[in-house]
Image: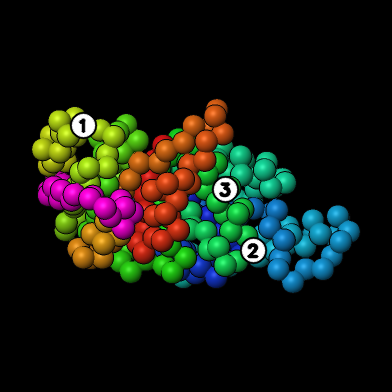
Amino acid sequence: MQYKDILLYIDDGNSNAARMKSGFALAKNQGATITGVTLAVMKPARTRATDADELKRICDQAAQERLDDFMSAAKKAGVPARTHIIYGNRSASAKKMAKYARNFDLVMLRQANHDVENASLVEEVAESVILLSGRPVFFMPYIGAHRIPCKKAAIAWDGTPAASRSLHDALPLLVGMDEVMILIIEGKTKTAKGELLADELSRHLKSHGVNAVVNRQTAGSVDVPTIILNEIADNDIDILIMGGYGTPSLKQKIFGGVTRTLLNSMIVPVMMSH
């Protein structure tokens, strides 16, 4: 199995170029078509228009220009591409984005940069897509990725359904990798050690042609995100695969605890499913 239909989020941030480059490289590796999607609700930074109709015209034009740039870059990269603009206010746009994402194999989003104005919108879109699309999400750091296609992966494994879903959604990436590490942090997980079944997971991955090694770490007084980030750095990992958590019916935020810390501090792409 490969990803044949990839959705790439485009906005007005400086990370667009790096994200497009990574998206094109992944699409080439998977033999996929890539669709650039953007939100018309984003107001250009230097716009001073106050008239509603004029502001809408400016925003629509800016959205189209972003996608024109995307198509131009895709043509140079030799990747089949298409585009889509999502219209509506902020809340409606985030939900429409999640609905639109349901018809793709993989969604590539960006890490929110809290030093810029649109960070909260980026997080709102990401939260909606994770919770409501049912599709795996490939989060790109705004600093870019150092190696695409990825060659070394870490799986943050706690035995939960969300972790299992993410792992299986990531199989098209894992197959053919040089190294895959099943990272288990003992002492912090809510899952009993006997239920983690790490050896069974390793066997299962091998049936798909993925040779994975189990790396057990003891949490002690060190928090889980720090251990994960240290293991990523120490093992030259290209991508982290982990479960995405949250309950939309309870308005529970997905970006809490370990997940929020990792997405705020990410040094490599993070792939997760809900």
Spatial CA distance of label 3 from label 2 is 14 Å
Q: Which percent across, then down, holds residue 268?
A: 35, 62
Picture coordinates of residue 125, whole percent (x, y): 57, 48
The residue under label 1 is 192
Quadrant of image for the N terminus: top left
Is 271 placed above or below 20 here?
above
Relative to 35, 204 lies left or right: left
Residue 12: image quadrant is bottom right
Q: Which of marks 3 and 1 is nearer the N terminus?
A: 3
Magenta segment includes 217: yes
> Are the residues flagged by discs 3 and 2 in contact, CB closer than 8 Å?
no
Q: Is mark 2 on a helix, strand or loop?
A: loop
Report which residue position mark 3 lands on. Answer: 125
Mark in front: 3 vs 1: 1
Pointer 2 residue: 117
Image-based side of 178 in relation to 266, left or right:
left
| Magenta-colored stretch includes residue 36 | no
Residue at image position (46%, 36%) is 246
* 10 Å crowding of disc 1: few (<14), some (14-19), many (20+): few
Q: Give the residue at x 47% y 65%.
A: 142
Instruction: In this rendered view, identify the residue nearer to me: 175 or 75.
Output: 175
User: Looking at the image, which residue sits at the far front?
Assistant: 221
Query: Looking at the image, is mark 1 or mark 2 earlier in the sequence?
Result: 2
> Which of the two discs, 1 and 2, sits closer to the camera?
1
- Relative to the observer, which residue lies in front, 249 or 44? 249
